[in-house]
Image (cartoon, grey):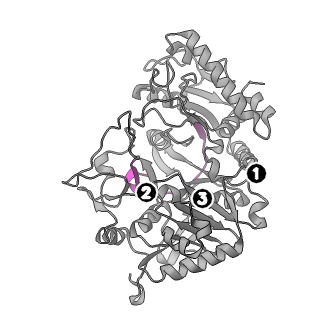
Amino acid sequence: MNNDGSSRYDDLSIAELIEHSVRLGEGQLSRRGALAVQTTRTDDVQRFFVNEPSVTDVLRADATFDLLDSKAFKTLWESVKDQIAEHPRYRLYAHMGVHPDKAVPLEITTLKAWHALACHHLCHIPDDAAFNPREKPLWKLIWAPMSALKHAMPDVADGHSGLIMMHVGKRRVLMAGDLTTGEMRRTLLTVLGLLLPEKGALPLHGAASLGDGQITLFLGPAGTQKTTWAMRCGQLIGERGLSWSEDGLHRLADGCRLHLDASLPISLDDALTFGTLAEELTLGPDRHPVITEPSDSERPLPVHLVLPLSKLQATAESDTRGPSQLVILATDPLGVLPPLARLTKEQALAWYVLGYGNHYGPLEHRQAACDIRCTPGFMDTLLPRSLDEYIYLLEDLLESHQTRCYLINAGWHGGICGLGEPLSSSEESACLTALYHCMDWQPLGAFGLSIPQGHSETAGPWHPQERWADPSGYERQLDTLKQTILTELQSTSDPVRWLAALELS
């Protein structure tokens, strides 16, 4: 509704937000009804926490956040609030989290209707009567144009195309710039990464599903197709925004953000219907999407879809027990990790600490390159506290829920990237079948891993070396991976523990 004749629109529906976006020229409707918007995507986003003991006492020493004086933040906040009051704006009352006992209540104000639409999917929108029933302190978030900050404090804003500032003590977040929905999600998860551990909950950038009577949680770095793997296991519980506590898994949002690629776990026609927000999607004259294969010389900005979880046939339940299984996904560009391996809990913790993978997954239609990235905790910059705090939480949760642990290599096999191949659909099915039913495991001989005994009837060999035409090439790349892991883990707070877990000490 339009609030008392003013230019502030409170709690508009998805349909109303899309109507406003189209009318204001923010986006264009595709033939099937998705809202296509263009953003100025940039890596030049500066992130700040207000300098206060509640943050600096727990902030990681290597955290990628600058500190801002509280007076400077107050000046910025008041100036931006006064400026946006002169413009049409959108306000949402939302929860980060579905269960009212666990949710963080949010008041979100944006100047663009499509920004509000993104927040609608990346949070949980309760019924009017159900908003913040526990009367928790309210977090306020403003998403404003960069000009609003430059006007108030040019010395802070100059030189950056995007700014994100968080004042924990005042429960306020200020975002500025034509940022992507990915930045909105990162900001919300960063706040939860700071708050949830105090409540005994672990924030997760993963996907979970219910299938064959098992709750399976998939964790891994970007490009590992976590959502796709989860949906192969059964009915989706949650995607990208999850928390895990003694009570079990808890979904944080009503929607998700997916990378549009060959492994999208939903048909393109179903994905691009009314209610979906498509960033960087190009539409032709007939409003049909134009999907082009990138050439070696140019890589267009990836298309991301923000859509309701209901389109992915997710369960209506936001809370669940377990998980009974944790699967860590890796996109190994060296081609030496097995398709499937069983992990001890200590090894699962070591792979969580390492966060090993390639910058691009093999199914993202980009030029194959060996670009190893280690993302501790699979969230890295989204985990503002010491990594040890999250490790201790995960260790306790694995023990409390008696969670079984596995590793799946969603990267390359039979050779390094560009020479090896990703798993075929039959091999992926064999991995999932073994995940549920394999009883006989044998030592791999590397990293303390165990692999299924023998050979799969529907897929290739379980031992990665048997997939290589040149065994000596396998050994060379295995040595490369060992050295890479050794170097990465040496920089952790407890290298002896993690190297011993992976039998590298």
Q: Is 148 within the magenta?
A: no
Q: CA distance from mark 3 to mark 2?
A: 15 Å
Q: Dot 3 corresponds to which residue?
A: 46
Q: Is residue 120 above or below residue 468?
A: below
Identified at 52% across, 42% down, the residue is: 222
Q: Earlier in the sequence, mark 3 or mark 2?
A: 2
- Magenta stretch: includes residue 310: yes
Mark nearest the camera among 1 and 2 is: 2
The secondary element bearing badge 3 is classed as strand
Marks 3 and 2 close (CB-CB < 8 Å) = no
Which residue corresponds to mark 1? 61
| Residue 106 position within the rendered picture, expressed as x and y whole percent measured from the top left | 56, 71
Which numbered disc flags the more N-terminal residue, 1 or 2?
2
* Residue 420 visible in rendering: yes
Q: Position of residue 403 (x, y in %)?
A: 65, 40
The residue indicated by pointer 2 is 40
